Image (cartoon, helix red, strand yellow):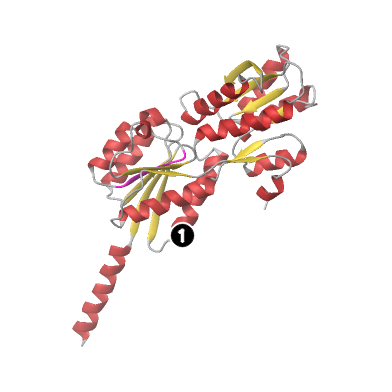
Amino acid sequence: MKRLIATTALCLIAGSALAETRIGVSMTSFDNPFLTVVLNGIRAEAERSEGVTLSVEDAQLDVAKQLNQVQNFVANGVDAIIVNAVDGDSTAAITAAATGAGIPLVYVNHPPAELDTGMPAGTAYVGSQETDAGKLQADAVCALLKGRSDPKAVILMGPLENHAALVRTKMVEDAFAQPDCKVEVIEKQTAGWNRVQAQDLMGQWLTAGLQFDAVVSNNDEMAIGAAQALQAATGKGDIIIAGIDATADGLAAMQSGQMDVTVFQDATGQGEDAVKAAVAAASGGALQPETWIPFQPVTKENMAEYLK
C-alpha cells in the first residue's frame, strides 16, 4: 500500500511538472510607461493561465543585451519566448536562436523585420497596425484645424530606428499633403518617446522662434512634454496637441486641456494575446502568424469611454 501511495504521489508530481509552462519575456525597457502597460497585460494573463511562470528581463534599449537574454532563455529550455524588440531591423538573430531550438517565439508591440516577408514557422507577431495610428491621429488634427489659414505643424518622432515612429510620421505627412487637409510640416525631430526630451526639444523650437498651429507627437509622453514646455513659455493657447497610445497620463492630459487628441492602442490586450499565443504554441498548438488589435481615435467627445 505504501508503495502504491508513493507511486501515485510521484505521478502527481510528474504530471504537475509536465503541466508547467515557462515563458521567457524580454522587454525593450522597463522605463517606458506604455511598455509597462504591455508588460502588466503579459503578467495578468500569465497569472490567469494555470501553470504558467514568467522570467522577465529588461533589455534596457540594448540590442545586444536583448539577444543575450533570448539566448539565455534558449539555454534554460523555456517553453516559449515573448520579445518586445528593441530594434525591429535587428531581430534576425533572435528569430534564429528561438526557431533553431524549436521554441515558439512571439513578438509583441514592436514588429520584427520578418513581418515584412512573412513570419517564419514557429513565430508570431501581436500588435496594432501603425498605419492606422498615424492616419487616425492626422484625421483628428485636420478636423480641429479646419478653417485656419495655411496651418503649420511640428512633429515629435520616436527613435528613428523604430518602425512605429517611422510609419506614424509618414502617415501624418501623407495626410497633411492631401487637398482637404493642407498642413505644412515646418519641423520634425526625434525625442526618443521621452517626455523630458520632448520638453527640451520644444523649448529649443520656441527659442528659435518657430510658430505653428499643431504639435503632432508619435506618442503621448512626448506630447505631454511639448505641452509642458509650451505652458512654461507662451502657454498652449489655440495650439492643437496630439499624441498616440491613450495612456493614463495621456488621458489625464486631455482632461486638463494639455492635449486635444490621442489614439488608443490596446497595450493590455497586446500583452494578453501574446501570452495566449505563447501558451497555445508551447502546448503544441499552431501559431497564428499575425494578430492585429485595432487602434481607436480618442477625442474630447468620446474620452469618457476610455477613462473607465
Farthest bottom residue in view = 1
Residue 307, percent across and down? 68, 49
Residue 195, percent across and down? 63, 31
The magenta segment is 104-109
45 inside magenta stretch: no
- Residue denoted by label 1: 47
The amino acid type found where label 1 is placed reads: Glu
Quarter of image, res 70 = top left
Residue 253, percent across and down? 71, 38
Farthest front residue in view = 179
Residue 119, percent across and down? 33, 38
Q: Locate the N terminus by quadrant.
A: bottom left
Residue 9 relative to residue 84: left or right: left
Q: Give the SS element for disc 1.
A: helix
> Which of 61/306 is in front?
306
Residue 257 relative to residue 50: left or right: right
108 inside magenta stretch: yes
Q: Residue at x 46, y 61 (%)?
A: 48
- Local crowd size for mark 1, using a 10 Å CA cut-off: few (<14), some (14–19), many (≥20): few
Is residue 55 depicted above or below 62 in this figure? Answer: below
Farthest left residue in view = 3
How many marks on residues? 1
Is residue 251 visible to the viewer in this orientation of the structure?
yes
Q: Residue at x 32, y 53 (%)?
A: 281
Is residue 242 visible to the viewer in this orientation of the structure?
no
> Which of 269/1 is in front?
269
Quarter of image, res 254 = top right
Majority SS type along the magenta span: strand
> Which of 306/83 is in front?
306
> Which of 284/74 is in front?
284
